[in-house]
Amino acid sequence: MSFLASKTLKNIPRIVQILRLKTAEFLTDSITTQQLRLLYLVDQHKTNSELAKMMFVSEAAVSKSLKMMIKQGLIKKTDSIDKRSSVLKVTPKGKKLRTKISARLESILDLEFKKLKPFEQEELSRALDKLVEVMEKLHVNY
């Protein structure tokens, strides 16, 4: 395994774990980390099956979370052309909560990134863009 492949496989899960833990600190008792992820994914018009695959959870877990979020007024069901399914939309309340949590996380990241020298910030930005490009090619090609 190449150095970069090894480093990528080692560090990305750690970065995701840290972001999830930090995000969980901002959540209230009214929303879980899984529900927050759904607030982002629902806007992409995914089916319950697709949402479950993207989140690595069961369809039942997604359905349960979505039902709770509908009760909380974070998302709503709207009719679709196909009467067998419905389209989920994030409500203004859900968007407000999503924006609030994202802003708090971004402010913490900004504080840390500001400690980097400008050229380090630029290098990191380019590296992240390149990493996304490589990962998207993997997703399409395999």
Image (cartoon, helix red, strand yellow):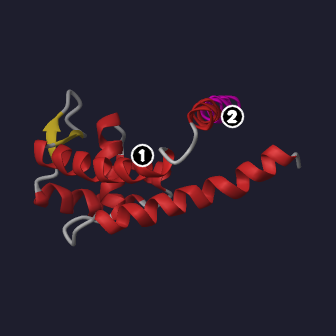
Say left or right for 124 vs 114: right
Q: Quadrant of residue 30?
A: bottom left
Residue at the spot 70% in from the left edge and 29% down from the top edge: 141
Q: Which residue is mark 2?
A: 138
Residue 65 position in % (x across, y down): 28, 61
Q: Is residue 141 visible?
A: yes
Say left or right for 113 vs 127: left
Residue at the spot 16% in from the left edge and 46% down from the top edge: 96
As drawn, which residue projects farthest toward the bottom?
A: 29
Mark 2 or 1, closer to the camera: 1
Q: Dot 2: within a 10 Å radius of its alpha carbon, few (fewer than 14), some, or many (20 or more) residues?
A: few
Q: Nearer the viewer, residue 135 or 110?
A: 110
Position of residue 19 relative to residue 120, above or below, is below
Position of residue 112 relative to residue 127, above or below, is below
Query: Which contiguous range is marked in magenta?
Result: 130-142
Question: Magenta span has 35?
Answer: no
Q: Dot 1: within a 10 Å radius of its alpha carbon, few (fewer than 14), some, or many (20 or more) residues?
A: few
The image's mark for residue 110 is 1
Q: Nearer the viewer, residue 10 or 139?
A: 10
